[in-house]
Every structure is written in structure tokens, then in C-alpha cells.
Image (cartoon, helix red, strand yellow):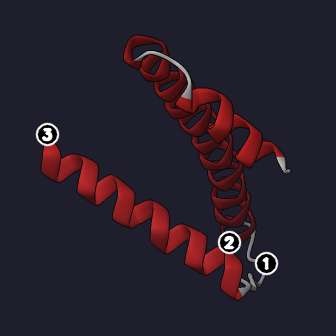
Amino acid sequence: MNTVEQIYQDVQEFPEPLALEVLHFVEFLKAKHQSVSNLELDQKIQQAIDQAEGGLVITLDDTYVDNLNQRVQQRLATAQKN
């Protein structure tokens, strides 16, 4: 049994308030991980800007562009909610 299956099995036995605490913790971990990913992306963007200002040629790989597009979409969605 893998970790996810073990967590699922254990949480099924919890009363609803305790299961809700687990859910909130999972959401916290997801947000924390997203914050780290966003920070790394911000650093790469700043590095690209610095290189562009220095006259260097910038080559972006598909993963980088996809991540950038995803982040822009997330910010747009957040802005629309507010």
C-alpha cells in the first residue's frame, strides 16, 4: 500500500471535524508548495530580464513558457475573483 492509500484509509475512520483539519493541512501544503514554485519562477523571470537588459540572447524552453503561461492565468483568475 502506498502513502496516499494509507492516508486515505486512515482518514476514512476520522470524524468529520478531524477529517476537515486534515483537508485544511493538505491545502496549506499545496499553497506552500505553490509559493515555492512561484518564487523560483519569479527568480527565473528576473534573471531573464537582467540578461535582456544586458543584451544577452534569451532562449526559453517549452516547460518554462508553459509555467509562465500557467502563472499568468492563475493571476488573472485571482484578479477576476477579487
Q: Which residue is mark 1?
A: 56
Relative height, residue 34 to residue 44 (above, below): above
For the point 59% across and 28% down, the residue is 11
Give the camera-side residue of 76 and 52. 76
Q: Which residue is mark 2?
A: 52
Give the camera-side residue of 34 and 43. 34
For the point 66% across and 37% down, the residue is 9
Q: Type of residue at label 3? A: Asn
Give the camera-side residue of 55 and 34. 34
Secondary element at image label 2: helix
Distance from label 3 to label 1 (Cα)?
A: 38 Å
Q: Quadrant of residue 77?
A: bottom left
For the point 38% across and 19% down, the residue is 16
Q: Type of residue at label 2? A: Ala
Asked whether the residues under the numbered discs 3 and 1 touch, taking CB atoms below 8 Å apart as contact, a structural biologist would say: no
Q: Residue 28, image x and y in percent?
A: 54, 27
Report the residue that reaches farthest toward the front.
13
Which callout, 3 or 1, points to the residue nearer the camera? 3
The answer to whether residue 73 is left or right of residue 25 is left
Q: Earlier in the sequence, mark 3 or mark 1?
A: 1
Q: Residue 49, image x and y in percent?
A: 64, 63
Distance from label 3 to label 2 (Cα)?
A: 33 Å
Asked whether the residues under the numbered discs 2 and 1 touch, taking CB atoms below 8 Å apart as contact, a structural biologist would say: yes
